[in-house]
Image (cartoon, helix red, strand yellow):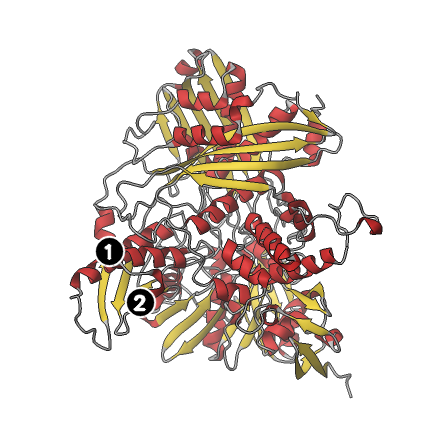
Amino acid sequence: MPPSTSSDLTLSVNGEKYTLTVDHRTTLLDALRERLDLTGTKKGCDQGQCGACTVLVDGRRSVACLQLAVAAEGREITTIEGVAEGERLHPVQQAFLDLDGYQCGYCTPGQICSAIAVIEEHAAGWPSAATADVRPEAGPPPLTPEEIRERMSGNLCRCGAYVSIVQAVARAAEEAVA
Amino acid sequence: MTTATRGAVGTAHTRVEGRDKVTGAARYAAEIPFADLAHGWLVLSTVARGRVRAVDTDAVLGMPGVLTVLHHGNAPRVDSDFIGMLGVPPDPSAALFQHDRVAHLGWPVALVVAETSEQAREAAESLVVHYETEPHDVAFSAGRESEGYPLDGHLPAVAEKGDLADRLAASAVVVDAEYTTPEEYHNPMEPHAATARWEGGRLDVVDSNQGTSWVAGELANLFSLDPAAVRVRSEHVGGGFGSKGVRAHQVGAVMAATVLQRPVRVVMTRRQMFSLAGYRSPTAQRVRLGADADGRLRVLEHRSLNQTSTVHEFVEPSAAAGRSMYAADAHHTASRIVRLDVPTPTWMRAPGEAPGSFALESALDELAERCGVDPIELRVRNEPAVGPVSGLPFGSRNLIACFREGARRFGWAERDPRPGVRREGRWLLGTGTAAASFPAGVGPSTAAVTAEADGTFTVRINAADIGTGARTALTLVAADALEVPTDRVRVRIGDSDLGPAMIAGGSTGTRSWSWAVQAAAEELRRSLVPGADIPPEGITARSNTAEAIGALAQKERHAFGAQFAEVAVDPATGEVRVRRMLGIFAAGRIVNPLTARNQLVGGMVWGLSMALHEEAVRDRASGGVYGADLAGYHVAAHADVPHIEADWVDDPDPDDPVGIKGIGEIGIVGAAAAVANAVWHATGVRHRNLPIRPDRVLMAGGDA
């Protein structure tokens, strides 16, 4: 008997369990888009270079195109469809909407998922390449535009909406502190 | 003509589809579900010139899930001998599998269709194609100008006025410089994607494009179908920038859906987009400016060469950029093309103006330096009263107002003109400026506006919102024309069944559609009797702007702008950082300041990216692009982009019913020159070849 080329697995996405049979070659990105009809996660390059497929895996940002669906079993996955609370948008979503932090919208779900993680990473004291003082006792650096730009640089926006994206992330971060 | 001034137009409005975009609910072309969907995967040639000898389909047809392999031996026939809506024949790489010739590396040679995308991809990568190879030639350079020839595109190739040699001899100062720009790729974030099916005797295509009237017309022509039998939808589009017309993916999907009689989706990979989706040709340009000692131009000569493929002529009309900008006694401009074994280039954001303004506006800066005249004052001295070549009056020309406002806000008056004298730690600092212009065009469109029984209004216009905010802008225009609040207006776009309309391209979209929407809405408002009941089917008024547009007087119609940039250059590493940019534009009435500012800034980001980052290098051995992906082809990322401001001066177009000129392209024009001029101001070194890479900065020296 030839070795099986598919497996049954259960994915936990946005708090829901999905049981499905997947081709071993299926990426998490394609499983979300093609099998679970969660098309909010975008495919921009399919090789980890653009950030459009950024999702949260166990709360950490991760590009869904560079991991196989079979490797995502047992992880808690959050996509753009799962960040709002019912009808109430996540503060990052609301800031993108209010400040026009997008144009075509195709990189937007990835930018928003990334930004949610950036705000948490920053609050947890993670330094970035733009951080002047990286000693743990220095505490979180101010979340300046330079810090946001550095931390968001894995998410390309070809429309060039970076200026308003940075403003949106800054506003959402301020709200998270307030 | 009246100009609407009341209410919504001119006030900031968040995007009407914004909630869908931030929640992931907005579905793009590859995201619309279809029952019984099959997946196609394109196979591209691995040789740059020759012919396909054989396609080994047998092994692949036996692979799991594979349904068919289409290639030149079995594909349905198409007719590509037509001139489409935009006045040009289709790109031959979209007329799939009609012969065995290979015109460039990455030429489409087969389409593998399977039940799943994983199966299609593996089968496509397993497909063995045998080629007869021939020597290829992809070496573009300025030295090949003699092999080139002038070609009229959307602008005439050549425009000549006055005696060049005579006026050069009479010039006190002559600047003579050569400039180059590399191959540049649009790279919209959403790859090209289409699903095709036959539904009730009609071809139904869900696509990502810049105009469904255009794409539906091209597909009807290609497949010899009654235009009424083709429907193309494209509701949300993840960027286009000129690349999203008829391409291999739609044609492949239609062929496969026809053969298999089931829905078929074809999506380009990011790497395939570097062969199949078009690009901006590299340019080699020469600018000669002759002037009096005070900087008044006697001579403006601009020659540009670009490459095209062996199967299709495309001109990047870079030399035409100056025809409307500066007066000179002798004014000679010519754009030429040379044919190579490369993919066919196409329109890319500000075709002609983007590379052309880099050369011309850099040369102007060199002239200012030579004459000891401030760069802004130089442009003031050369401001024409009428079109410098055409002699036609300007619709409106507020270039100098842009410079004055920009200079005030940027702090230009305090600028020390000497180069290479400002240091801040390891950085050398400099500022630069450049002018921008882009034609204000318009195309015929139809619209329908319906008063619904529930008191709302539905606007039907086959617009394309590729990120421009068109859907929102049209909502504002309709609300004002109907004299109702915006929340009572819903706008339907992106469906060829809505009727013919202009594409999102050439900065004409929002202007063209607004004209039609306003005309239909005003007609409707006039026909409604206050207090009268609306029947269940509503009351509809329609418009067609063809006649009104045809009656427009010939004028020099352009948007203008002034670009400013401040850069820091590290002479030890060659790194160039843009610290701030400011663009002030005179670009007609601004319909929605929130989205307009974003779009203008986006154009300036493109200019920054063009100045410092974007470059596709073609490998002469293989004939293809090295690193054909978003790692090998860097576009500006968050960390590259500082705070950039865009604003505007009052400049309503007097001949447009809404006052619009169009803002999609003006933001990139002149932006790269402003950055390059700032690099000169920082270092004292002129960079005439883009991008201004660290190695170029290092090789040029400049450690003042």
* Residue beneath the point at 51% across and 64% down: B21
* Residue beneath the point at 49% across and 48% down: B598
- Across and down, in percent, residue B136 comes to 60, 47
- Height in image: B326 above or below B209? above
In which quadrant is the C terminus of chain B drawn?
top right
Question: Could you tell me which chain the residue with mark 2 belongs to?
Answer: B
Label 1 SS? helix
Where does label 1 land, which residue?
B519
Of B509 and B591, which appears nearest the observer?
A: B591
Q: Are marks 1 and 2 on the same chain?
A: yes
Q: Is residue B534 left or right of residue B650?
A: left
- Height in image: A127 above or below B268? above
Crowd band around label 1 with a 10 angstrom C-alpha radius: few (<14), some (14–19), many (20+): many
Of A41 and A21, which appears nearest the observer?
A: A41
- Across and down, in percent, residue B701 comes to 71, 25
At label 2, the amino acid type is Thr
* Residue beneath the point at 70% across and 60% down: A120
Of A150 and B602, which appears nearest the observer?
A: A150
At label 1, the amino acid type is Ala
Q: Which mark is residue B458?
A: 2
- Height in image: B259 above or below A113? below
In which quadrant is the N terminus of chain B drawn?
top left
Q: Which mark is residue B671?
A: none
Sequence-wise, which precedes: disc 1 or disc 2? 2
The Cα–Cα distance between marks 1 and 2, rounded to whole angstroms, is 14 Å
The answer to whether residue B668 is seen in the rendering is no
- Across and down, in percent, residue B47 comes to 63, 55
| Residue positioned most to the bottom | A1
Crowd band around label 2 with a 10 angstrom C-alpha radius: few (<14), some (14–19), many (20+): many
Label 2 SS? strand
- Across and down, in percent, residue B26 comes to 50, 67
Question: Could you tell me which chain the residue with mark 1 belongs to?
Answer: B
